Amino acid sequence: MRWLVVVVLVAGCAVAPAAPPVVPPPPLLPSPSPSVVVPYRVEVRAAVEGFADVVDGTLGDPRGWQRAGFRLVRTEDAPYTVVLAEARETVRLCLPYDTYGTYSCQNGPVVVLNADRWRTATPEWTGDLATYRQMLINHEVGTCSGSGTRRLRSVPCPGSPPW
């Protein structure tokens, strides 16, 4: 949109035109009903406390995956797994991807989070550790759902949703 700027001289004074009105952003649309149920389980292979609670809280947050139509449900026999592992174990679980003992990954039905990053975040992270952990979970689960960078859709069981 182009604006024509007109300066009106009234008795020797310049009068600027009024600024265009500020339009507020539209409100968030209501969340769609969760249509895809995704069962997951949690494994802790590192010396940390509270990992499973943070995973459950993040994946069950109504502002997250539920808004995208997924309902993630923790069950012990689930085909999808979120693992917290030490660096050496992360390297093994992420093969054939090379995580250099530093990065986390999603490998088929397994999301592997590096325990060193879980404990301290990355040097570049400017926010708090709790928010980093939520981002890490959402990012790696996102690669499993097909909304991430790798778009792997490995489904371990026939008929399972390619989340």
Image: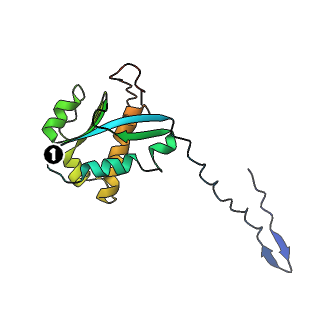
Q: Residue at x 84, y 74 (%)?
A: 9
Q: Which quarter of the figure has residue 146? A: top left
Q: Residue furthest right?
A: 11
Residue displayed at 29% across by 57% down = 129
Residue 149 shows up from this direction:
no
Of all residues shown, which one is farthest toward the bottom? 11
**Residue 140 visible in the displayed image:** yes
Q: Nearer the viewer, residue 157 or 129?
A: 157
Judged left or right of residue 27, residue 16 is: right
Q: Quadrant of the C terminus?
A: top left
158 or 139, nearer to the observer: 158
Q: How is the image coloured?
A: rainbow
Q: Is residue 19 above or below residue 12?
A: above
Snapshot quadrant of residue 85: top left
Q: Position of residue 42 (x, y in %)?
A: 26, 41
Q: Which residue is mark 1?
A: 46
Residue 50, image x, y percentages: 24, 53
Decide which of 121, 137 is in the foreground and name it. Answer: 137
Splitting the image into 4 quarters, where does residue 74 fall?
top left
> From the viewer's perspective, is residue 48 above or below residue 34?
below
For badge 1, the amino acid type reads Ala
Left or right: 90 in relation to 154: left
> Image point 46% across, 38% down: which residue?
70
Position of residue 148 relative to residue 120, above or below, is above
Characterize the local packing of mark 1: few (<14), some (14-19) or many (20 or more) Cα atoms within 10 angstroms: some
Q: Horizontal and vertical percent for residue 93?
A: 20, 31
